[in-house]
Image (cartoon, coloured by chain):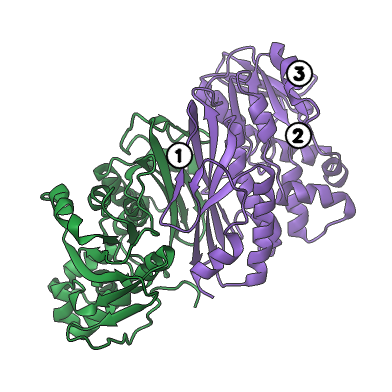
Chain colours: A purple, B green
Amino acid sequence: MNEFELIREFFSGKSPSRKDVVLGIGDDAAILRVPDGMQVVATVDTLVEGVHFPAGLPAEDIGHRSLAVSLSDVAAMGAEPAWALLALTLPNADEKWLADFTRGFLALAQRHAVALVGGNLARGPLSITVTAHGLVPNGGALRRGGARPGDHIYVSGELGAAAAGLRLIRNGIEPEAGERLRAHFARPEPRIALGLALRGLAGACIDISDGFFADLVHILQSSGMGGEVNVETLPLAPEAVELLGRAEARQLAFAGGDDYELCFCMPPSRLAQLRQRLGNADCTVTQVGVVTAEKSLRCLQTDGTRWVPDADTSGYRHFK
Amino acid sequence: MNEFELIREFFSGKSPSRKDVVLGIGDDAAILRVPDGMQVVATVDTLVEGVHFPAGLPAEDIGHRSLAVSLSDVAAMGAEPAWALLALTLPNADEKWLADFTRGFLALAQRHAVALVGGNLARGPLSITVTAHGLVPNGGALRRGGARPGDHIYVSGELGAAAAGLRLIRNGIEPEAGERLRAHFARPEPRIALGLALRGLAGACIDISDGFFADLVHILQSSGMGGEVNVETLPLAPEAVELLGRAEARQLAFAGGDDYELCFCMPPSRLAQLRQRLGNADCTVTQVGVVTAEKSLRCLQTDGTRWVPDADTSGYRHFK
């Protein structure tokens, strides 16, 4: 089976159809229509086997995860997901693997009405690059640079769960208590609903991919601000605390990476409105700190003493 | 130096600025504005070291080539290039290599006013994925499916030159006569001006990446047509004929791949208008065949006898 037949068999016609897709997979390029009054957001991410996920991770997880990490950036911009292009590099044409990968990828695409509008299949060491596009009303995108003194710093969900899950996967041990942690790593859920709800409310937003600390620093630097964080308020997964102890779970929450939760800054007066917009959405929001005009980031404990991380506090760096 | 600093140093602020880029590199995603009355075309391509180019190809060539192959798809749609996202996977943070790569990439971006609006840098085996976007008036894109009986089949430039150049690079021999062949492989020039000139004239268009034969088959299948090609009219590079002999040069023109020329179908009555639009553009256009209603592709010689390729006639296949 050659490249064209593979792409046709596994992807064509299976992804959600959208009215704004004039022409999907099958020509030199897709043709896309942008509704009046909307802007496009675009982002690209690569996952390399052995670097971003361990060899042997089930293909269905890899399919989900490769789309999820790009959609997480779309969420952080407050955009509605629209289109994706998939560049898949595979060591060999394993049809079972491809079918599993596709199932994971398309199930997530379906849930967020993302049309797969372009694909490239190449032979080589396993890696997946997904370009994702979203739509946002003119001027309505969330950026990193709008945090103001007095804003509260919030995060969604739980932090450090994915890093704890990755550790369990790497150690080859998956006790039942770890299943939810494992899913946090293997099947992150992009916070699309939260991103949309934050439009017009949050001054700054980022998705937590490198780790809470590193990504908060991105927001504060872009905004020309500093901050104060109470590390005891970081939302931890109970399973991580149980399996690793509270101190270690906190370290992972602080700098573990791969969370794909959102971190955002917003005047606290808007929290009620945010909760109203979120309604019954399955998304907790926790205040973990406050933005300051002084350009430093202080990490404190509840009793006011300094907290010093013992891990690499720079988050996940690709080239150290 | 970490990922962020690398991206900032090598790419930020160096690519052309465009009014339709509301926000470029540096946030979770770029924000892009699409002018009224225009549609977006989007395409993705991956180059893997050792598969799509030989190990040791100079980084500046790789930078040029990785953008060129995606812009070639934009050209084939008749679109004006606009934005690109670059996902670069590197075994190590070699700053010299990155500087050279960037020079090649950005020089081509500059020539076609392409803004680099997104980047991802990962550690892993060398591969480059570029997503390219173009703009085209509503309904004005060139597709593969509009060839009609009696249309002539045309190609731009010379065919087989890149495949001959790749052979020279692989054999480690670069006689002076081969320099232009080598450049055809290492530095293909996307046919942007030709694609724009073909708007409203060509019924079907494709870029020749898999090889003339394979890509012409794509056009004919999409159009529900057949064709007749005179292989003696395929435009060959004189250097390829000199170095490899005419028979071998013709085989490479027929099925060699990597040409990144355009193949298009158009009523012959429009050729004069096309030439007028092209003006002094450095782009030859050669008629090589005719579209037929009978759904087969016949390859003939000038004396009317059948021509049978001795190479793999399916073009370049990634998974055989």
User: Marks 2 and 1, how far apart in space?
Assistant: 29 Å
- Residue B175 in view (yes/no): no
Q: Position of residue B176 (x, y in %)?
A: 13, 72
Taking A265 as reference, is B138 left or right?
left
> Which residue bears the numbered disc 2?
A157
The circle on residue A304 is 3
Disc 3 crowd, CA 10 A, few/some/many (<14, 14-19, 20+): few
Amino acid type, callout 2 = Gly
Mark 2 nearby-residue class (10 Å; few <14, some 14–19, many ≥20):
many
Foreground: disc 3 or disc 2: 2
Q: Residue at x 57, y 13 (%)?
A: A293
Find residue B306 and report its horizontal and vertical position in percent.
27, 87
In the rendered image, residue A51, in percent from the top left (x then y), is placed at 59, 56
Q: Earlier in the sequence, mark 3 or mark 2?
A: 2
Q: Does dot 3 land on a helix, a strand or a loop? A: loop
Q: Disc 3 marks which amino acid?
A: Gly
